[in-house]
Every structure is written in C-alpha cells, then in structure tokens.
Amino acid sequence: MAFLLPTTLAIVALVFSFAHAFDPSPLQDFCVAANDPKSTVFVNGRVCKDPKRVTADDFSASGLNVSGVPAGVGLTVNTVDVDRIAGLNTLGIFMIRVDYESGALATPHSHPRSSEMVFVLEGTLEAGFVTADPSNPTKNRLYAKTLNAGDVFVIPQGLLHYQANVGKVKAVSFNSLNSQNPGIVPVAPELFGSVPAISDDILSKAFRVDKKTIELIRSKFA
C-alpha cells in the first residue's frame, strides 16, 4: 500500500479546500425547489419537489423585458433566482436585470460566493473591480472599462466592484452569477450602517480622518 508524504497530503488538502469553495455539485439532473418555506435548508439549496410532479413551468419565467424594483437612487433590479424559477435549485446560477438612470451607480460591493458577468444591453456603463497590484502587493489596482451595448465585463469572485451609468441616457445590463446564493456585501452601508455600530475610533483610524468626518458619513446611513 502506498502512503502519501506529509507535503503531498497538505497539497491534496489544499486542492480539496478550493474545490469546496463553490456551490456543491448536484447529485442528480435537477432538484426543483419544493414550494414550502419550512422545507428550506442551508446546504446545497432546498429540498426537492417530487420529480413526478415537475413540469416545464418549473424551469421558466417571464418578465425580464421590464425594469424591476428600486435598489438605490436611479437604480432598479429584476432578479431571477430560485424563488422565481424553482428549477434553478442546486444549479449554481443567478441572474439579474439592472436598469440605470443617467448618473446612477451600483455602489462598491462584493459577492463573496460568486463571480459575475455583466452584459450591457443598452446605454454606456463603466464597470470596474479592485484587487492587489501584481507588481506591488502593498498597493491596489483598479481594472475598469467603459462598456457599450453588446459589451461584456467579468468580475472575479469576492472582489470589490461597481457599475456606473456614465452616459446621458438610460442603461440596462443583464448580470449572471455562478452561485445560487451569491450574497452581497455593500461597502458603505456595512461599515457605516451596521447595528451595533463600529466605533468611530476604529473607523477614523481605518480611513485616516477625524471622528467628526466619520459621524457625518454615518449620519447618511442611519
């Protein structure tokens, strides 16, 4: 019997730790979500509907031809998730239509469990993300692009990013994410609107400003 050396074991463990960083792989062709809130679980989606009762309607939805609900100043979102298409359960897919009025901004945020692909249907957007500078790990680098209709921009998993309408007319994008539950961490509300609040002392040191400035910013998210 062959034995793995400690170094080899460490490498194997590391590989498997990365493999489990994404949505778990489904064990069957589909697992249509049972329409019962009490049946919701927190591992690999929801419990499955009886396959004998599954229909084509469980894999379809309409309504992405219109804007959705307000999600900020000048911003609306129309989301396609497992609540809307039960057949998405365990498939690791999430989609959202975003409508931007001129000047509207999807403020800096991240998706801890998903990469994102932004497809611009109409208008002009600036999309960008920030990561460590490969040439200087003590600095950060912005990767940003001005996108027009038909253009695509990819945002790696977990990185801080934004989209802004830099045109003079409305813009629309369709964003696809490779997780059933990508999560969202909006930077400013998380830091300045948390309950209980992060202390002014900590935030003033982090942002290198005085506490009065922190109090002013916090008041915007009260």
Image: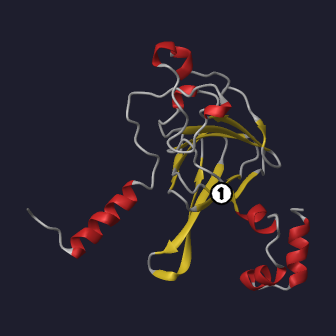
**Based on the displayed image, in which of its 4 quarters is residue 134 positioned?**
bottom left
The answer to whether any part of residue 203 appears in the image is yes
Q: Residue at x 65, y 57 (%)?
A: 162
Which residue in the structure is indicated by mark 1?
162
In the rendered image, which quarter contains the C terminus? bottom right
Residue at the extreme left of the image, as rendered:
1
Q: Amino acid at mark 1?
A: Tyr
**Based on the displayed image, in which of its 4 quarters is residue 4 positioned?**
bottom left
Task: Please rate how many residues cluster around mark 1, counting C-alpha atoms within 10 Å: few if below 14, some from 14 to 19, many from 20.
Answer: some
**Based on the displayed image, in which of its 4 quarters is residue 210 positioned?**
bottom right
Can you say whether 7 is above or below 24 in the image?
below
Can you say whether 191 is above or below 83 in the image?
below
Q: Please indicate whether residue 134 sits to the left or right of residue 106 in the image.
A: left
What percent of the width, then of the height, locates residue 188?
Answer: 76, 64
Q: Residue at x 74, y 53 (%)?
A: 105
What percent of the width, then of the height, locates residue 175?
Answer: 58, 42
The answer to whether any part of residue 121 appears in the image is no
| SS of the residue under disc 1 | strand
Q: Residue at x 58, y 38 (%)?
A: 95
